[in-house]
Amino acid sequence: MRVGLVGTGYAAKLRAQTLLNDARTDLIAVVGNQSSKTTAFARDFQCRVLDSSQQLIEEDIELVVVSNVNSEHGAVVRAALEADKHVVVEYPLCLDLVEASELIDLAKSRDKLLHVEHIELLGGLHQALRQHLDKVGKVFYVRYSTIKPENPAPRKWTYSHDLFGFPLMAALSRLHRLTNLFGEVIAVNCHNRFWATEAEFYQSCFCTTQLNFTSGLLAEVIYAKGETMWEAERKFEVHGENGALVFNGSEGVFINSQETTPIKVGSRRGLFARDTAMVLDYLFDGTPLYVTPEESLYALKVADAARKSAELGITSTL
């Protein structure tokens, strides 16, 4: 299978290496935003450099992998599908909810794969959560916090309103992990703050969101990064009537009234390679994938509700 790649960043490199090592695929060409970086990428992964994503899509390829900035996902995915290519795209599918739904419908009408990557479902934390979730009984509260101090904050697309998008749409995995585990959301409250000293990039972001699920569960999600954050945190807590699961970084425990028991958490390494291999297994052998675009769309719907709540100062209902 002939493959074209849009993007030259971290995810793109991991996917390119997997494609290079898989006898079923031939990486034909790559498109990037920086000439020198793209040239080096093409040299390392033995493919050609093209000038634009449209030029790439017009090549004799069957699969387009979209690993560029969030704001460009929708346009590239649409062009690829309209050219009858299969598509893999990193989350989010795009930054507009209506457009995302249209793209899913377009893929179905063209009978083409549209796979939105959600490697958080494959990782050790999520698998450990699934394995031990029944132990806590009826879940009533979840707290999921990812805080990343960066000083100085990098002047790059992940700190740009236009390129990165609303924080919880851009960092969609935070919400998708919850909807995958706990189902439907009925209401969202969100507060968001940015610190910026220049027009093009902000230096810090703090976003906190409460999700009310149909089950009665209340979940709190915190996503923060930048120069006004002082202590890193990557913590996931699940509190139930019979106990709690607490994951702090790569360490986890189950707690109840009798004991505190360590939980083994698998690695986060190799997930992009695994996702890429699973896509190829689907395309060549029909092996079912681990996530559907509709599941990603629902998480994006929750994220869009959070955006509206933050912008209008209201509770958003779904």
Image (cartoon, helix red, strand yellow):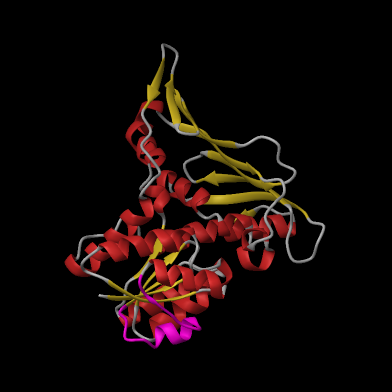
Along the line of sight, the residue nearer the viewer: 313 or 200: 200
The residue shown at (72%, 49%) is: 152
Question: Which residue is at 70% across, 51% downward?
Answer: 153
Where is residue 85? Give x, y as percent.
34, 80
Magenta segment includes 209: no
User: Residue 112, located in which quarter of the rendered image?
Assistant: bottom left
Q: Is residue 44 above or below residue 152?
A: below
Above-or-below relation of 294 to 141: below
- Is 23 left, or right, of 142 in this rendering? left
Q: Which residues are magenta?
A: 46-62
Residue placed farthest to the top in the image? 258
Q: Left or right: where does residue 124 sit relative to residue 287?
A: right
Could you say where residue 135 lies in the image, as x and y percent from the top left? Answer: 36, 26
Question: In the depicted view, which residue is nearer to us: 155 or 265?
Answer: 155
175 vs 164: above or below: above
Residue at horizontal 61 percent and vertical 63 percent from the top = 164
Left or right of 296: which side holds 186? right
- In this view, the residue farthest toward the right is 197
Quadrant housing residue 127: top left
Question: Residue 59 in magenta?
Answer: yes
